[in-house]
Image (cartoon, rainbow, N blue to C red):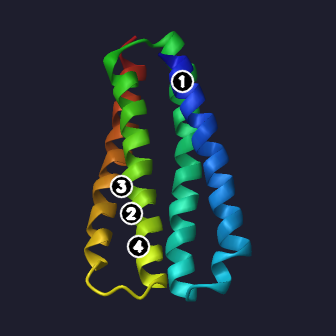
Amino acid sequence: MHKGYLKTAAFLGALSIAMGAFAAHTLKEMVSAYSLEIFETGVRYQFYHVFALLAVAILYKEFPNKFIRWAGILFVTGIILFSGSLYALSAVMAAVAPGYQWIGAITPIGGLSFIVGWIFLFMGISRK
């Protein structure tokens, strides 16, 4: 199981670097400063949680329990929902497509996934 998390973390880490480079070199020419800030927040939280996923992968060997496994699942879910919704919101704002602001409502669900993931990580480490 931990090898899957390591591979996922490596992929999401590379993706976060690519997204950050895109924002720094291309996106800043296309969108408002506010939209760029939203996009960069997605990149930042994605990258933070790549490290959290790496920790889960490493800790799973020492603490192989359902809480550690679920922490990894929740971190990946959080990246998809939190960062993904911010990327999508930036794209919608760049396209000036009215009526899609509801995408921002997905972001807190991703944030909640991050929070519960951290709580599960704590519980998994505590259950040796």
Q: Identify the disc placed on residue 111.
A: 3
The amino acid pointed to by label 1 is Ala
In the rendered image, which residue does mark 2 sit on?
A: 85
Q: Residues within 10 Å of mark 4 (few under 14, many from 20)?
A: many
In the rendered image, which residue does mark 4 sit on?
A: 89
Mark sitting earlier along the chain (4/3): 4
In the rendered image, which residue does mark 1 sit on?
A: 57
Q: Secondary structure at mark 1?
A: helix
Mark sitting earlier along the chain (2/3): 2
Q: Secondary structure at mark 3?
A: helix
Q: Residues within 10 Å of mark 1 (few under 14, many from 20)?
A: many
How far apart in space, not on screen, are marks 4 and 1 (Cα)? 30 Å
Q: Are marks 4 and 1 in contact (CB under 8 Å)?
A: no
The amino acid pointed to by label 4 is Leu
Q: Secondary structure at mark 2?
A: helix
Give the answer, above or below, for where 111 lies relative to 24: above
In terms of image quadrants, where is residue 69?
top left
Q: Residues within 10 Å of mark 2 (few under 14, many from 20)?
A: many
Mark sitting earlier along the chain (4/1): 1
Left or right: 18 as drawn, with respect to 59: right
